[in-house]
Image: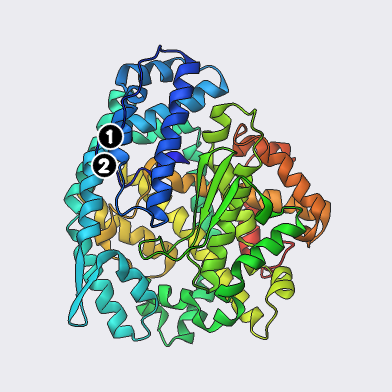
Amino acid sequence: MWYTLLVAVLTGKDHSPVEKYCMNTHDYEHQAERFLIAFNEEHCEYGAGLKSSVDFAAIYRSYNKLFELDRVKSLIEGRSTRQERYLAQFAAFGFVEHSLHNLTEDIADREARATIEWDGGEIPYRQACFLAANEPDRTRRRALEDRVAAAAEETIPLNAQRIHHMHQAAASLGFSDSVEMCDDLAGLDLKYIESCASNLIEETAEVYRDLLESHLRDIGIAPAEATTTDYLFRRRGEEFDDLFPADVMVSRLHDSLSELGIDMPSQPNVTLDLSDRPQKSLRAFCTPIRVPEDIRLVLRPRGGHEDYLVLFHEAGHAEHLAHVKPEVPFCYRYLGDDSVTEAFAFLLGQLPRVRGWLNRRASAANADDYRALARLVRLHQIRKTAAKLLYELKLHRAADLNACRAEYAEILEKALFLRAKSANFLADTDDFFYSARYLRAWMLEVQLRARLVEQFGPMWFTKREAGDSLKDFWAFGQEFTADELAQRLGYPGLQVEPLIEDLLSDEDDAAR
């Protein structure tokens, strides 16, 4: 998951230079682990509000030997074992990010400094979406949405350059384009996942549209006129805050994990940072500093159902990483198929929307109404990810990026039934097709959950034996791919049909 953090590389003072070392697997792994420890710690301290700026570029310079062209090509060409394949992916994606860091830095700086005129003053560009989600007046919401889109226009030329340089970097490694590079190195099977995404969007369209229209009417919005900010406002679900108070959020997490046989407060390798600092990230996140010795989960409790969902999701990452056996090789502790850790995160992250969990932890008269909203949120999230994958495959194969602008809005609007701003056609993408990893993770999560229900019953999440079963999976880190874990669960491999069935079901409870 390390490369998903490489989106804000900033300049700074040099770290101590790394000593010279021979080109062999042992030395490379040793230096790669040191690089990730330094990088992840920097990221964690910045996100936790302990630092006002980051020094990613300096870390890269200190470990630049890891990403030298000849060395990376040698790792790609020499792949034969599983560990060598994981190392090649790490090296190649690191090489690409290193080649993009100046543009990445410029984009991040512009977004950080950008402001929008609002209510007679100026607000930070990045704060605008949070304001839109809490703005009850439709006219003001849409005015804010228009101004955010206008600000996004400013970064289009830089984002276009960045994608162009990404393709050049992939070509220098011997690939025809970034699509081939990601498919080959990460083993994503993009052709299959693309067909899964299309099928999912088609098969779940009716149930999603009915739910969306119902919830839009609740806030007085005609479905044909709805925009993304209208959905964000409805998604906020302020009327359900009584179900999810901030002051018991962590205790509910601890109680839920305790039933699985996990005593989070007593885990020496898991640090839960709850301090309220002015510069702290508003979103919870999990960062592995040393796997499994030092895993940090950072959050700034505010309450509301989305905080719960995010916290439980990140706790899924934390427990997975914290239970990796220390003797597991570096490649399986830090690298591998990120679809696996995302599946475990989705598994725990869905608990606050489950009927059985709500009845035990947050019973209230409006719990069923909340579950209907939570179902819409999940459908929207998965359908948007599927649509983004379809769009990104077209984008990274396009001869002219500007020609993709209209296609972005068309694909998103067809999947989500919400008006989309075309100004985001380059910014609203993820490097290295992480959208494919998310879809693979959702497929695996449903398969894993079905087996847990089969073995331990609908209330599996209250059984210590289910926790023991999860710990058995977690112990291997990411040695096995999502496809291999699906086979170990008794499936032919990753399948989209169980996920579609799960999304279509109105029995949104622990058994589904």
The answer to whether residue 456 is above or below residue 302 is: above
Local packing at callout 1 (Cα closer than 10 Å; few below 14, some 14-19, many 20+) is many
Q: Position of residue 86 (x, y in %)?
A: 50, 27
Which residue is found at the position 20% from the left and 42% from the top?
161
The answer to whether residue 137 is above or below residue 164 is: below
Quadrant, the C terminus? bottom right
> Which numbered circle lies on residue 163?
2
Q: Position of residue 397 (x, y in %)?
A: 31, 40
Which residue is found at the position 31% from the left and 61% from the top?
409
Residues marked 1 and 2 touching at CB (< 8 Å): yes
The residue type indicated by label 2 comes to Ile
Instruction: Give whichever of 199, 428 is nearer the camera.
Output: 428
> Which numbered circle lies on residue 452?
none
177 horizontally vs 437: left or right: left
Q: Secondary structure at mark 1?
A: helix
489 horizontally vs 156: left or right: right
Q: In this figure, which residue is indicated by the disc labeled 1?
A: 167
The residue type indicated by label 1 comes to His
374 horizontally vs 118: left or right: right
